[in-house]
Structures are given as structure tokens and as C-alpha cells.
Amino acid sequence: MATTVRSKSSKPVAVVTGGAGFLGSHLCDRLLAEGWRVFAVDNFLTGSHDNIAHLGNNSDFVLIEQDVTQYVKVPGPVAFVFHFASPASPIDYAEYPVKTLKAGSLGTHNALGLAKAMKAGFLLASTSEIYGDPLVHPQPESYWGHVNTIGPRGCYDEAKRFAEAITMAYLREDKVHTHIVRIFNTYGPRMRLRDGRVVPAFIGQALRGEPLTVFGDGSQTRSFCFVNDLIEGIWRLSRVDFNEPVNIGNPAEFTIKQFAEMVIKITGAGSSLVYQPLPQDDPKQRKPDITRAKQLLGWQPTIGIEEGLRRTIEYFQPRIGREAARAKA
């Protein structure tokens, strides 16, 4: 895929850092569908060429293959910068703690610098992880969090907390038109099978006929938002004049054990459950308060967990089949 600039266009231009990632690639699709030109910046540490392969012949899509912690240069005017670049799963930030911190600090600084130079809007992809293991349930945007700064998850939590702080600093000092979305657990096509998050982990194990691994006793809760709903919320947030954080997620709450049983049922697998110790600092509860998103954006999720899981399972089934074929070869 070429990195050169293609024919000039009157369409507004967006830069999406992490544009080849799970969420970034879906955002690129939405922006293109809305009539934008898109420059996707990605170094493929955790992103995938497969996620953007379908955009290879789209003249409004340009890939810039680089690390966002290096100075980001985009030719011509830019209307909006969406900063999504970061390792975002436990297995990734365990393997790349320094790179995770750099993406949240240097990467956010560079992305904000680009928005400032171009007089562009800016949206930070933050996370529910900034709430840590919360003492308030559900979590509203006004909650400051309960985070272990030196624990194994601290590199991701603190990277995003710093990213929010520097985003607000650019708003206050440099008048950059900023937005912050706090993303709760999101799932759907283009997730990596072995990225360590519970949705692909359970689906992969069920489709292979393996036991599903539950950490702790399975009583900890999560809420799961399908990617299409999330992207709709992010698009709406980017269109409004509001600078404080906004939770985007699905408030339907399940225990991990309930969720595992649901995956087994929908896949038709004969899998059992196996239990392992709960990882350090693993949140016991996670559920968004989406009152602000409802009032500000007129947004709420529309895709239920069973429909979303079916779509995600359909995406993973051929990939599991190819994986099995390679193992036999």
C-alpha cells in the first residue's frame, strides 16, 4: 500500500494514529463512508495489514507506516486527528510496557502537536482502565479512579491518564479543540485471536473445542460493547463541542462465568470451564455510566451481546479453520 499522497481532493482530511488496529481500522472505514480522506499512521507493533487490506485501492486512504512516538508529518491541511495508537490488551502491554508508556506520552504529544499546527480537531482514545479497580459502580466520568501506578497494568493505566492530562493542557493553553472518549470493553471483527482479551480468548478456545479459562471464580463483571456501536459513539462525539471525557460502552453487565457460558452456548461447543488465579490488579467490576453520552450525543448501544457475539464468531471461524489446517500440515 503506497504512502505517497494521491490526487488532491476537497474532502476533509482526518489522521488516524493506530489506523491499522482493531478500533482504528473500523474508524477509518467510518470516516471514509462519511466522505473524508484518511491518513492512517501505524507502525504495526500490534496493528495488522489485514485490517486495512480492503482499503488498498481506495484513493482516499493513505497509509503512513511509522511510529507515532516520532514526529508525525502529514502533507496538506488536516481537519481532525484521532489518536488511537497504543498497545491495548494485557498481553501487549505486559510485553511492551515502555512502548505503551511512550505511545501514551510521546505519541499523544506528537498527535496533539499535529492538531495544533494544523488547527485541527483532536480526539483521544482513552480507556475505562483509567478507573483502575473501581470503588464506584457503575463508573461515571466524574470518578477519579483507583489505580496501582506500579503494578503490572500501571503502564497502560498511567499512559492513558497522562494522555488525558496533556490533552486537557493543550485545550487550556493552546486552545486545541479536543475530545476524550473513555472506551469500555469493545469486541468484534478484526480483534486478534491471541491478544489476551476475554472475548477472543473464549471464542478461540470454544471453536477449538478447548476448555475456557476463567480467572478467579468468574464472579468479576464486565460489560461488552460491539465495535459498530462504539464507532458510532466516537463519530458523534467528534461532531460536538464538548471537551471533557465521555464514557462509551455497553452498560449490560455480565459475570465472566456467565459470559463464558454464553460463548459455549452460541458456538455449540462442548467446552468446560477451567479456573486459574486472578491476575494482580484485575478489576472486580467494570460497567460504564453512559448518562453523559445519552444526553450529549443521543447515543446508546443498539447491538445486543448475542448478536454481537454471533458476528464476531463468524469472523473467527475461518481463521480457526486455517489455524487448524496449518497445524496439520
Image (cartoon, rainbow, N blue to C red):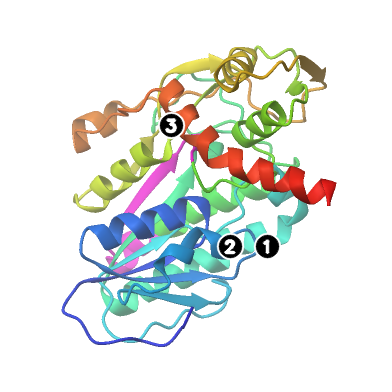
Q: Quadrant of residue 318?
A: top right
In the image, 2: left or right of 78?
right
- Give the residue type at disc 1: Lys
From this view, report whether residue 283 is shown above or below residue 173.
Answer: above
Q: Who's the residue at 77% across and 23% down the image?
A: 278
In the image, 45: left or right of 1?
right
Number of numbered discs visible in the structure rendering? 3
Circle 3 packing at 10 Å, graded few (<14), some (14-19), many (20+), is many
From this view, report whether residue 60 is shown above or below residue 130.
Answer: below
Image mark for residue 99: 1
Residues at marks 2 and 1 touching, judged by CB atoms closer than 8 Å = yes
The mark nearer the N terminus, 2 or 3, is 2
Q: Quadrant of residue 44?
A: bottom right
Q: Whole-percent x and y of residue 190?
A: 52, 48
In the image, 200: left or right of 239?
right
* Residue with the mark numbered 3: 225
Separation of marks 2 and 1 at Cα, in angstroms: 6 Å
Q: Whole-percent x and y of residue 242?
A: 23, 48
Q: Quadrant of residue 215?
A: top right
- Give the residue type at disc 2: Ala
Front disc: 2 or 3: 3
Instruction: Pick whichever, 117 or 235, lies toward us.
Output: 235
* Residue with the mark numbered 2: 103
- Give the residue type at disc 3: Cys
Q: Which residues are magenta?
A: 168-188
